[in-house]
Image (tube, rainbow, N blue to C red):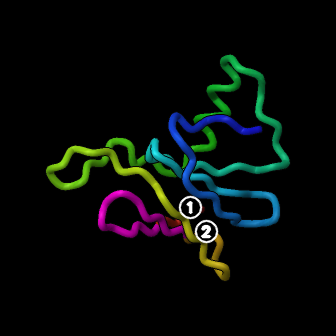
Amino acid sequence: PFTCHRAKVRTLAATSSTCILSGGDDGVIRRWDIRERPPARGTSAQAFNDRTILVEQRSERTGRSGSRIAINTLAVDPMQSHLVASGGTDPLVRLYDVR
């Protein structure tokens, strides 16, 4: 198993037959290649974890509420799998080019 999110995972989306994206309450979108094996815990594990991060919304704030922006849903353009949209705990839809 791949374990990297610091909070509950809310959504998964496939970008190809071997890669998936995950998003969750920690405000991070990660890319996972199922052909890679995650390393054992330690220094190389941290480098692997850092490498999987595509987007970090943890530092963004929503208006004046001060709450963190969790990621509740992901959508991948079926014709251009490098275009990913995310929806979360604020009123915005974000579009990312993850090339």
Using the image, tell me which numbered label, if any, was put on residue 86. none
Q: In this view, does 89 lie to the left or right of 53?
A: left
Residue 59: x and y in percent read: 33, 42
Residue 5 covered by magenta stretch: no
Give the residue pinned by disc 2. Answer: 82
Cα–Cα gap, marks 2 and 1: 5 Å
Question: Which residue lies most toward the bottom here?
Answer: 79
What is the quadrant of the C terminus in the image? bottom right
Q: What residue do we see at 60% from left, 71% from top?
A: 76
* Residues in magenta, as a range: 84-95
Amino acid type indicated by mark 1? Val
Residue that mark 1 sits on: 98
Count of picture labels: 2
Question: Neighbour class for label 2 at 10 Å: few (<14), some, many (≥20)?
Answer: few
Sequence order check: which comes first, mark 2 or mark 1? 2
Q: Which residue is drawn at 40% across and 59% down?
A: 88
Could you tell me residue 19's position as x and y percent? 74, 57
The residue under the point 55% across, 53% down is: 10
Residue 89 lies within the magenta run = yes
Tell me if residue 6 comes above or below residue 88 in the rendering.
above
Q: Where's the N terminus, which quadrant? A: top right
- Give me the residue at 69% from left, 66% from top: 15
Q: In this view, does 94 lie above or below 40?
A: below
Query: SS class of the residue under badge 1?
Result: loop
x, y percent for residue 22: 61, 52
Quadrant of residue 82 within the rendered picture? bottom right
Query: Residues at badges 2 and 1 in contact (C-beta under 8 Å)?
Result: yes
What amino acid type should be assigned to the residue bearing mark 2? His
Main secondary structure found in the magenta portion: strand
Quarter of the view holding residue 77: bottom right
